[in-house]
Amino acid sequence: MNNNQRVLFMDYNLIEMIRQKAKQYEAETAQFLRELIAIPSMSSDEAQVIQRIKQEMDKIGFDTVTIDPLGNILGRIGNGPRIIALDAHVDTVDVGNPDLWDFDPFRGKVENGIIYGRGASDMKGGMAAITYAAKIIKEIGVPDDLSIYFVGSVMEEDCDGLCWQYIVNEDRIRPELVIITEPTNLNIYRGQRGRMEMEVKTSGISCHGSAPERGVNAIYKMADIIKEIEQLNHRLKTDPFLGKGTITISHIRSTSPSLCAVADSATIHLDRRLTGGETIETAVKEIEDLLAFKINQAEVTVIDYSTASYTGLIYPTRKYYPTWTLSEDHAALKQATAVYQLLFEKEPIIDKWTFSTNGVATAGMFGIPTIGFGPGNEIHAHSPYDQCPIDHLSKAMMFYSGFILSERQF
């Protein structure tokens, strides 16, 4: 059976209806995105933006709208036994240096068909698009066997996938398929490298800085380890689809009795991106096997995350986010490709994210088939050029609606 045969019942009239409704709601979706951008919502500070999303979902007429104890908002349409979910995290990174911005990051500026502002690409554009895709699906008719969750998830920027660990383990919602709506430039994505965060610590003996030979400087011990980690990055494994694993030092700190004393400890923070075949065990062992690590009797630790959400709930986890891919012959990917072909009358680009997403939990931890499709381009994420084209919103709505309305069991 070829892809077009799988969705043969998605006839011309349905395709045109989806296109027309997506265009009809484009302006409302764009205005909704602008209003979401206008609400600052860094990780653990998403309460106001969640309430704004609830207001929109209530206005549209979702069957249920709930906010779970972690603070995720889950809007549902349909009452069938099978569950599909569309995910958009609603937290953003901070602005950084405001002098680098040519516009107010919280205004939602519109110029030449593009909406600018913090979170436009990563990823309030995805949240706006799935909210109005739900409106389109409701108006055309939700498939009888489906319950579809449209999730505004929290804390992703601080701890990828924590929200979905909570949704699956505590809310007891386990979809058979998840669509991640992080920016893909309207391409279809089927995976990403994983990541983890580690700390390496060296210990020394403090003494007065006027006579450093009396002590053991932990920073000097760390210097040799740093050089070896830089070299380690060049020889990490490469995967033909996901690319190369990487490691970098993102922070360094030390302790001493005073600024006139030898450092008695030094700690570096490692950002480790994991390609296919790399795991938490292999990544830790690579550090432990470094000659300077052994000589200097250093310690390596995988970091734990235990920050409170905006609701006050702490849901601790280890900062290990597994690599994941969806196979090229998976039914969900074939369905996504067929829907794309019918709606846009061209072949999609099948690719992967460079950065990390909530797929580390849905696919990486729980093995739930996961695909990606979102408005905006990831090159603008976390940058002072954060933006989302308005026509991406309507095209994303078309794809989400078309996928659901032509859905097959996965």
Image (cartoon, rainbow, N blue to C red):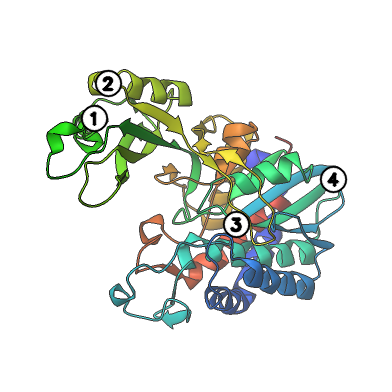
Left or right: residue 237 versus residue 274 is: left
Q: Secondary structure at mark 4?
A: loop
Could you tell me residue 216's position as x and y percent?
21, 31
> Residue 52: image x %, image y %?
67, 74
Q: CA distance from mark 4 to mark 3?
A: 23 Å
Kindly identify the amino acid type of the residue bearing the numbered disc 2: Leu
Which tag is nearer the camera, tag 1 or tag 3?
Answer: 1
Left or right placement of residue 282 versus residue 393 in this view: left
Residue 290: which disc?
A: 2
**Badge 1: few (under 14), some or many (20 or more) residues near its Cα, within 10 Å?**
many
Q: Are marks 1 and 2 in contact (CB under 8 Å)?
A: yes
Residue beneath disc 3: 88
Residue type (three-letter) at the residue carrying disc 1: Ile
Label 3, secondary structure: give it.
strand
Q: Residues within 10 Å of mark 4 (few under 14, many from 20)?
A: few
Residue 225 badge:
1
* Dot 4 and dot 3 residues touching (CB under 8 Å): no
Instruction: Tell me the CA gap for discs 1 and 2.
Output: 8 Å
Q: Which residue is mark 4?
A: 145
